[in-house]
Image (spheres, rainbow, N blue to C red):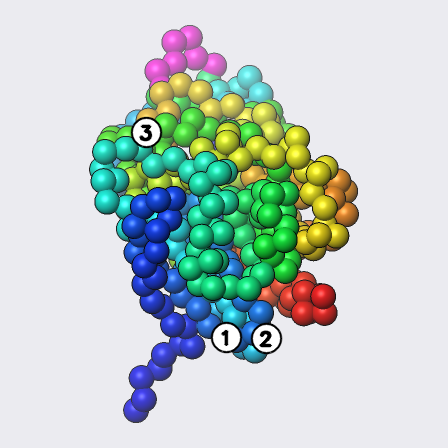
Amino acid sequence: MNPRFEPITGRYLHLDLLGKAHRLYVEEAGQGIPLLCLHTAGSDARQFRGVLNDARVTQNFRVIAFDMPWHGKSSPPAGWQDADYQLTSRDYVRMILEVADALELDRPVAMGCSIGGRIVLHLAHEHPQRFRALVGLESAAYTDAYYDLAWLNRPDVHGGMVCAGVISGLVAPVAPDTERWETLWHYMQSGPGVFKGDLHFYMLDGDIRDRVDQIDTNRCPLFLLTGEYDYSCTSEGTLDIARRTGAPATIMQGLGHFPMSEDPEKFITYLLPVLEKIRAL
Amino acid sequence: MIDKIAGLVNADPRLVRRGRFVDTTFMIAIDDAPTLLRVQEGRVTKVTQGPFITPDYSFCLRASRSVWEKFWQPLPPLGYTDIFALVKQKLMRVEGNLHPFMANLLYFKDVIAAPRREIKR
């Protein structure tokens, strides 16, 4: 009997990111237009398992999903123990461009969720010429903090359990149980302070409300997909970006903040029409 | 609704197990009507309706009756599916010593949402 492998290949990429040596875990599948996938805060590229495994996507797209440094199988850089992790807009943008360069991607499509959905707005604003198209999943220009982030990293509270607890309600109540709990598991596995460090970008540094009007979707098409149950990046937040940029937006029924992970099959029915439009560009 | 919580939680061994280190008393306030729920080793062992003169509890979840009624529907409307969704919209306040709540968040979320299951039956 042959071993039953998925078509996903995982490898470690050596590169300098933000001036430091990194060993980055990268998964990919498929061929064609490069589609660079950006996971949510405090999770990792496993969230894109459904997209990487879907032949309808991979027959025309080379899907690439990497674990950001500190996340998943990408360790923090040497010396990490001496500083708190804190993601900034500047570093996040540079990281994406440097990863795309290291992989020698020619004008990839970048698709990000949550913090990834925010950073594609920054990419659209600052580097439209570098991308064929951008796809924002759960994109909002800004999100208010609605709990004290200090709870996410303190020795008397289990970090994995509190991170999963905080985000659990962002999964749609109608999501399949297996995928819901796998989505939570990714959060339970996050390193101490990593989710909190990502949220520095999400709730503070990454606020782009004052620049949304300057995004020119003629220079780089932007597509927006948001789950109806997402109360963090709300439908209203996404529709506001759509109104201000002209980007087409779809509110996805029966999905929450982690569409590609909480219900991959349902999500891909929304993604495929967007990918068709990108192919036709 | 609130009187159903103890029976529903205690009949769910997976939930009791998840809360096996919890030992606290917390309050649910519906409008101005408070109820204290005592939790020991994951079981809700005592439910006391107010009013109270000097209530002793760790944390309190406070919302209007109409908010709680929507929250406890088997499939709540958009925006009412989760405690933090309500907090973000300022429809619910979580007050007091939040340590037991945050340290056992997955447990308390299911305890507080337990009445949804009662309506389903």
Query: Few, some or many C-alpha atoms within 10 Å of disc 1 (few <14, some 14-19, many ≥20)?
Result: many
Label 3 sits on what residue type? Pro
| Residue labelled with disc 3 | B100
Residue range highlighted in magenta: B51-57
Query: Few, some or many C-alpha atoms within 10 Å of disc 2 (few <14, some 14-19, many ≥20)?
Result: some
Residue at image coords 57%, 33%: A207
In space, the residues marked 1 and 2 are separated at their CA atoms by 7 Å
| Element at label 3 | helix
Question: If you read the primary sequence from the N terminus, does the residue marked by circle 1 or circle 2 appear first?
Answer: 1
In space, the residues marked 2 and 3 are separated at their CA atoms by 50 Å
Q: Chain of mark 1?
A: A
Q: Main secondary structure of the magenta part?
A: loop
Work out whether residue A139 can be spotted.
Answer: no
| Residue labelled with disc 2 | A60
| Element at label 1 | loop
Looking at this view, name the residue that lies furthest to the top: B53
| Residue labelled with disc 1 | A30
When the figure is inspected, residue B86 is found, relative to residue A189, above or below; the finding is above
Label 1 sits on what residue type? Gly
Image-quadrant location for residue B77: top right
When the figure is inspected, residue A251 is found, relative to residue A268, above or below; the finding is above
1 and 3 marks in contact (CB < 8 Å): no
Left or right: A80 with respect to A247? left
The quarter in which the C terminus of chain A is drawn is bottom right
1 and 2 marks in contact (CB < 8 Å): yes
Of marks 1 and 3, the one in the foreground: 1
Q: Chain of mark 3?
A: B
In space, the residues marked 1 and 3 are separated at their CA atoms by 47 Å
Residue at image coords 69%, 43%: A215
Residue at image coords 60%, 29%: B89
